């Protein structure tokens, strides 16, 4: 399952925003344009699907939690208007949530209501219609729905003393609950930090990786032991660092100071290996991003804030290219934000799985997003690189007031 469309209303700086997504989605734009708000809307939706809208859970997913009045759009004056987020997957299944704050509570609390927005799906059984005819209306491609409806509706409804339409509505609601949970399970906004990546002292509230990178060593142990193909792919891609000769995982889980052992190819083997505490930040971030994308234990859909942190511009481009390839191979869907033009050169916009969006504020201050299509050459000239188009202001998303 892949998220294909999302429609966000009344969330922070977003009044009404629709997006058509690929597997790889990169958002660029000015500071304060609303890029992070877009990512947070997805995390907020995932929390609603899990029925976990308490502040502690929202914060652990990477959402900047504040008072409800600031979570709702400041451009919508009526406080009773809910936050609304609708989604559609690649099979045409549509669903959504309306999320309201409980104003009578002394502490910020939220309540979500699931909405079914797939009008083409059957919702009732007519008197002249057999159950087999009803099943034929359900697209075979909609995973799980036919299995859920495998019970004999008329006989079961008669046994329970319910009209068949009531039982069907209950089953439809059950399907959408299961569907939303499966589609959005584990969505996290990752913003790795140097301190969390370097010390390995604690795990995050969200497993296997916390939003700051907590739990990385344990995930690396899982990769090296149980996901050998992913571990080998990680080591192969770590060769982006020219000086790196080897990476070894400390097997002792009970050691007071746990570590990753590194060797520099320019240093004699007679000298002991050093650990992550002495490694440069670029190594730590590269290790984190590759483990996140390659592991089978990490979420199928997630976001990364400012992936370019501590990385050389050319390394950014190549890392983006490789992460896109690896994510598409593994069916992972990722949302990125960046301010580094070089990262854009790793995108292939001719591949419909890879998409670039420019986020900006319109004249009313509302967050908008515009998809950038593949550049077309002018006459016999080669198209300019995306990084150059960005810095020259041809894509938008850069300040115009100075």
Image (cartoon, helix red, strand yellow):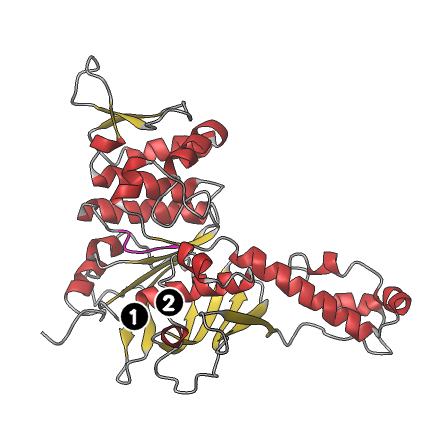
Is residue 105 depicted above or below 291 in this figure? below
Residue lying at 48% horizontally and 62% vertically, measured from the top left = 54
Q: Please tell me which residue lies in front, 349 or 381.
A: 349
Residue 135 drawn above or below residue 11: above
Residue 294 rendering spot, x and y as whole percentages:
42, 41
Q: For the point 75% across and 66% down, which residue is it? A: 136
Instruction: Quickly name the residue at label 2.
Output: 38
The residue at the far front in this view is: 106
Furthest residue in direction top, as rendered:
270
**Number of residues whose C-alpha sits closer than 10 Å to that of mark 1, classed few (under 14), some (14–19) or many (20 or more):** many
Identify residue for label 1.
359
Q: If the image is split into quadrants, where does the C terminus sit? A: bottom left
- Give the residue drawn at x 39%, y 64%: 40
On the image, the x and y values in percent for residue 15 come to 39, 79
Q: Secondary structure under badge 2?
A: helix
Considering the whole magenta stretch, tell me its main secondary structure. loop
In the displayed structure, does residue 230 sit left or right of residue 396? Answer: right
Per the rendered image, the range of residues in magenta is 303-307
Q: Quadrant of residue 305?
A: bottom left
Disc 2 to disc 1: CB gap under 8 Å: yes
Q: CA distance from mark 2 to mark 1?
A: 9 Å
Q: Nearer the viewer, residue 334 or 134?
A: 334
Q: Earlier in the sequence, mark 2 or mark 1?
A: 2
Q: How many marks?
A: 2
Residue at the (26%, 32%) spot, across then down: 276
């Amino acid at each position: 399952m892949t998220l294909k469309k999302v429609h966000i209303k009344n969330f922070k700086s977003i009044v009404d925003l629709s997006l058509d997504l690929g597997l790889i989605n990169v958002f660029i734009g000015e500071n304060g344009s609303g890029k992070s708000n877009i990512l947070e809307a997805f995390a907020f939706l995932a929390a609603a699907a899990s029925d976990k809208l308490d502040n502690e859970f929202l914060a652990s997913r990477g959402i900047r939690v504040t008072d409800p009045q600031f979570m709702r759009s400041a451009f919508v004056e009526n406080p009773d208007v809910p936050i609304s987020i609708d989604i559609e997957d690649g099979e045409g299944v549509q669903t959504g949530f309306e999320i309201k704050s409980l104003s009578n509570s002394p502490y910020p609390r939220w309540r979500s209501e699931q909405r079914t927005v797939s009008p083409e799906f059957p919702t009732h059984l007519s008197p002249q219609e057999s159950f087999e005819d009803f099943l034929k209306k359900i697209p075979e491609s909609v995973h799980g729905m036919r299995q859920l409806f495998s019970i004999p509706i008329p006989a079961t409804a008669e046994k329970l003393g319910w009209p068949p339409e009531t039982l069907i509505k209950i089953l439809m609601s059950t399907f959408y609950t299961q569907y939303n949970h499966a589609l959005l399970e584990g969505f996290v906004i990752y913003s790795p930090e140097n301190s969390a990546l370097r010390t390995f002292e604690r795990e995050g509230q969200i497993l296997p990786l916390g939003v700051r990178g907590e739990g990385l060593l344990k995930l690396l142990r899982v990769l090296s032991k149980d996901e050998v193909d992913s571990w080998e792919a990680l080591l192969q891609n770590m060769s982006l660092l020219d000086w790196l000769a080897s990476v070894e995982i400390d097997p002792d889980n009970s050691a007071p100071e746990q570590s990753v052992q590194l060797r520099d190819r320019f240093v004699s083997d007679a000298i002991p290996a050093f650990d992550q505490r002495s490694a440069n930040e670029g190594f730590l971030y590269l290790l984190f991003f590759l483990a996140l994308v390659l592991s089978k234990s990490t979420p199928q859909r997630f976001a990364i804030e400012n992936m370019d942190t501590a990385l050389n511009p050319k390394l950014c481009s190549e890392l983006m290219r490789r992460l896109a390839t690896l994510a598409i191979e593994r069916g992972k869907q990722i949302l990125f934000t960046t301010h580094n033009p070089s990262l854009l050169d790793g995108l292939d916009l001719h591949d419909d799985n890879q998409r670039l969006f420019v986020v900006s504020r319109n004249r009313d201050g509302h967050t908008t997003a515009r998809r950038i299509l593949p550049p077309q050459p002018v006459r016999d000239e080669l198209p300019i690189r995306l990084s150059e188009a960005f810095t020259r202001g041809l894509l938008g998303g850069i300040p115009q007031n100075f």
